[in-house]
Amino acid sequence: MTHENDIKKAGAGAMSSFPDAGAFPPGFLFGAATSAYQIEGSTAADGRGPSWWDRFAHTPGAISDGSTGDTACDHFKRWPEDLAWMQRLGLRAYRFSVAWPRVMPAGRGAINTAGLDFYDRLVDGLLERGITPYGTLYHWDLPLPLADAGGWQARDTAQAFADYAAAVVQRLGDRVARWATLNEPRCAAWVGHLEGRHAPGLQSLPATLAAAHHLLLAHGLALQALRAQAPKASVGIVLDVKPYTAAAPGAEHEAAVRRADGVFNRWFLDPLFRGVYPADIAAEHAASMPPVHARDMALIAQPMDHLGINCYTRGHVLHDPARRHPHAAEQHVPGAHYSTMAWEDWPDGLTQMLVRIHREYAPKALYVAENGAAEPDKVDADGRIRDTARTRYLSGHLAACAQAIAAGVPLDAYLVWSLMDNFEWGRGYTQRFGLLHVDFETQQRRAKDSALAYRDFIAAHAAAQATARA
Ligand code: FCB
């Protein structure tokens, strides 16, 4: 079956549940996101060095299906085809990450020009198709030599990151206007250093807090480097945020909500926008904190141009003293829909987080840098993938964005995670988040019904804009 045939089969009837496209202002960008290690493969091509994710994925038992990112979606070779898919879907924005080990295989020092050439070609291809590139400088693939020198627990890694960021922006900054320094420092610190499910696979609170602080420092130093290199660029960070609700009435459960929110959300939002760690959680963590130097917090809290949020689900919790701090046990919501990640589809949470961040932290602009759902997709005999749960998830979360805009939130883009099925970190290839289905044996891509519904919604937005202009 050709791609053209594939793409013409519209997701019949799915449009009805999408919000009115006119609720999104002109210039609002709809797109999709990916990250380097999850899609590129070709981990030794053109001088790329190893990252700690290469080592972690090759560690027996680390990845649930025993897989690695060695091939992933083979995007390093198939990028022209992937650009063609983005164009067919009418995407107006594409968020990708630059792999640090392609650009600086040793982590610092010599630049590998061939590594930068890849992103150069990708960016030109996006611009030729009218797709706005959103560059992310770190999506978790730390060069192995830096990992061996202490990783994010070493304060020096922050300066190495700023130098690498400057090198990337020197090459691409004339064409890429929107940059995020880091993707999800919370996940990088907590899941990698406390839960041990991501590289480097540690389980230590001091390591977690040191990594988190040095990631924030890396963001601050990179922000300075980017401002010097590309004064006109719009620069920010991408945070994972999660609304918490109490699963039962009672002051102890409300207190658990506040603690969980403190660890997940405020631990990053407060330093970045107020220059302080939240006092309640800082008191809890005092004995495990790394040294914080006098000027660190001012560096971390420099003004940004925008904030990207990754928001997927909520934490519905009960106070549970038997668990480690924040003593919160996640509960299932009866009757709710859960993805294969066991994440609840709860669009209200996205509206709540957007409105709250706007009111309490007032970033100049906000965008949804990731949102999407993993579902048990299957290719039917007729070649279609009838992923109605994903279409429902996306339309519900787009409606949640429209509500936030109506409430005054300066939201300017929405990016689906993910353009295509890919390597979902510790869960390998078991979780399919894509708008495009990927057959990992043949590397064939197919548009799922949700992709076609999203395409039609984006087209409706373009049509509403054209009508408004006429
Ligand atoms: C986010 C990550 C992204 C992807 C999604 C499902 O935490 O940024 O790479 O794994 O979750």
Image (cartoon, rainbow, N blue to C red):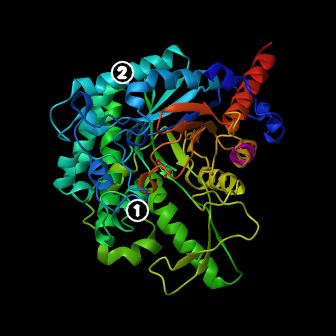
Image spot of residue 268 (x, y percent): 45, 58
* Mark 1 C-beta closer than 8 Å to ligand 1: no
> Is residue 88 part of the magenta span, yes or no?
no
Image spot of residue 255 (x, y percent): 58, 79
In which quadrant is the N terminus drawn?
top right
What is the number of the mark on residue 191?
Answer: 1
- State the extent of the magenta-drawn residues as a range: 390-399
Residue denoted by label 2: 120
Tell me whether circle 1 and circle 2 mark residues in contact (CB < 8 Å).
no
Q: Magenta stretch mostly in which secondary structure?
A: helix
**Residue at image x 26%, y 46%?**
51
Q: Which quadrant would residue 196 be assigned to in this image?
A: bottom left
Say few, some or many: other residues with alpha carbon within 10 Å of mark 2 (under 14 / 14 to 19 / 20 or more). some
Image spot of residue 378 (x, y percent): 64, 45
> Please, which residue is most extreme toward the bottom here?
322
**Residue at image x 74%, y 71%?**
334
Nearest to the observer: residue 70 or residue 299 = 70
Residue flagged by tag 1: what amino acid is it?
Answer: Val
> Is residue 398 part of the magenta span, yes or no?
yes
**Residue at image x 44%, y 43%?**
303
Nearest to the observer: residue 315 or residue 166 = 315
Residue flagged by tag 2: what amino acid is it?
Answer: Asp
